[in-house]
Amino acid sequence: MIKNNAVVGAKIAVELNKEMAQAISVYPTAKIITVGGTNVDIVAKSHQLFEPRTSNIGANKVIVGGVGRNITECLYRLGQNQTLFISVLGNDFNKELCIRNFSENNMVNEIFEQQQQ
């Protein structure tokens, strides 16, 4: 299994490298390039003491994060507006949520969609 993971990882790296080279050429003014993860956290909190095996009234919030995304947002807040963020997202609702978040934070990004196996 470990050997197979390494082979699959190497294939992904080669393909991503090809696509990244094209993306970087589209953004020649980028002075900083961040390549990293993006994820969506869903935080749920009960208003009362949590009771297992029943409904619990509470609230939840959705937070877009990920190390690469968070670093890029910090760079933008520090005035580094010539930063390009490159990440891979799945083809689902969270992808749209993440892209909207990038736009709201004025983050220039190049997103590669994860292909179904």
Image (cartoon, rainbow, N blue to C red):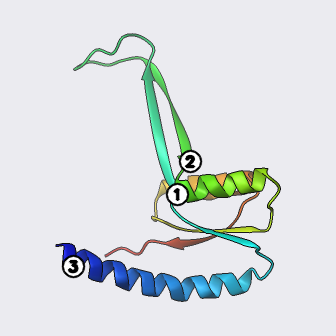
Residue 82, how many percent across, how many down? Answer: 79, 68
Question: What residue is disc 1 on?
Answer: 38
Residue 45 lies left or right of residue 7; in this view the side is right
Q: Residue at x 80, y 62 (%)?
A: 81
Cα–Cα span, label 3 and label 1: 25 Å
At mark 2, the secondary structure is strand
Residue 18: x %, y % from top left:
53, 89
Point out the residue furthest to the left here: 1
Q: Would you identify the image quadrant in which residue 23 lies?
A: bottom right
Asked if disc 2 and disc 1 are in contact, CB closer than 8 Å, the reply is yes
| Residue occupying image coordinates x 69% and y 53% | 73
Residue 4, numbered circle: 3
Residue 96 can be seen, yes or no = no
Which of the pair 43/70 is nearer the observer?
Answer: 70
Q: Position of residue 13 (x, y in %)?
A: 43, 81
Q: How far apart in space, not on screen, are marks 2 and 3 (Cα)?
A: 31 Å
The residue that appears at 60% across and 56% down in the rendered structure is 69
Amino acid carrying label 3: it is Asn
What is the x, y in percent for residue 37?
51, 61
Residue occupying image coordinates x 21% and y 79%: 4
Q: Write down the residue under mark 2.
A: 64
Precedes in sequence: disc 2 or disc 1: 1
Q: Is residue 108 left or right of residue 18?
A: right
Mark 3 touches mark 1? (CB < 8 Å): no
User: Which of the 4 image quarters holds residue 45?
Assistant: top left
